[in-house]
Amino acid sequence: MAPTWTPDSLPDLSGRTYVVTGGNTGIGKWTVHHLARRNARVFLGSRSAEKGQKAISEIQASVPHAKVELLIMDLMDLSSVVAAAKEVANKSSTLHGLVNSAGIMATPFFMTKDGYESQFETNYLSHWVLTWHLLPLLQRTARTSPPGNVRIVNVSSMGHAAAPSEGIKFQDTSLKHAFTFRRYGQSKLANILHTKALERRYGPNGGTAERSTAIWNVSLHPGNVDTQLNRKAKGSSFTPVLRYLGVFMTPEEGSYTSLFAVAGTELKDQDSGSYHIPFGKKKTPSKMAQDVDLAEKLWNWTEKEMRSKGFI
């Protein structure tokens, strides 16, 4: 599928600062690349210092003027996420965009040291905590920026439709006995519900945020991208076939909708809170992903959980 929007449409981002999780590889790395190419300052989130620095060197080799800084963050360790958010707040007086891009897909069952299933923590909980701690900085930046310059992007997936029938299984979010793609689907549904809850509290269409501090919020499916997620996914024997048939887009093309969402001038006020697919096209997600009550229940559950464990 030929891109209908490319990063060449991005405006000059001089003076703007962004955070991108999973910035050392795949979609995240290309998101950092194109933001830096348009003169933004970017914090590149990476669990590994070695891999993160390698990614920065590669980006700077092709974009010599790139202003990219390493941000160590282990999304299976919530205390590491809190520390990363504090580091950003200490190093930068502004933040114009947060791209919650990192993720794992269909991995074997594993519980993190924080007591949560690995996909649920990596894909959703850690990004919720990171966002929570960066919201004051985002709001301060919005107060002194033109409307729409400050945005939060949650990279979800069309796989959100594979979530359990009730959406989020609050009584046991680990879904230990479920198929691994069911656990993945729940985490990706949570990303979209997170966006809906953010919009209600902080967005221009939520009804509660002050216009002067409104943050635009977008969730998205980046496309069927040939990344390491497919190679590491349990039961991914179909991947070589799909690659041969040309079904996959490149990781660079996979970054386009994230870039459109976080900095594209084509995104409008009324688009905040919506779900997008390549390349920046609005689409209606699953019925569960449209459930406002479920979004509120998930936000309240998450806030209570994270507060009880001292992460917020």
Image: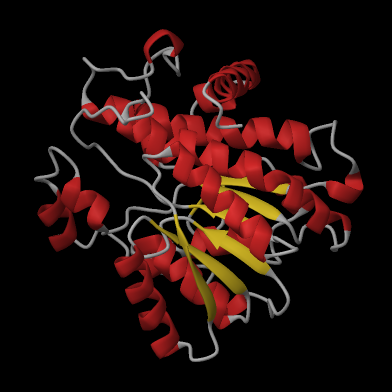
Q: Residue at x 24, y 36 (%)?
A: 106
**To which quarter of the image does residue 204 belong?**
top right
Percent across and percent down for residue 76 are 36, 40
Frontmost residue, 57 versus 216: 57
Q: Residue at x 71, y 67 (%)?
A: 265
Q: Residue at x 63, y 50 (%)?
A: 152
**To which quarter of the image does residue 16 belong?**
bottom right
**To which quarter of the image does residue 37 belong?**
bottom right
Percent across and percent down for residue 184 are 33, 32
Frontmost residue, 113 versus 261: 113
Left or right of 303? Residue 201 is right
Query: In the rendered image of this protein, does residue 249 appear above or below residue 184?
Result: below
| Quadrant showing the N terminus | bottom left
Frontmost residue, 186 versus 282: 186
Percent across and percent down for residue 10 are 63, 74
Frontmost residue, 191 versus 73: 73
Percent across and percent down for residue 196 are 64, 32
Q: Residue at x 90, y 46 (%)?
A: 211
Query: In the rendered image of this protein, does residue 148 appear above or below residue 202?
Result: below
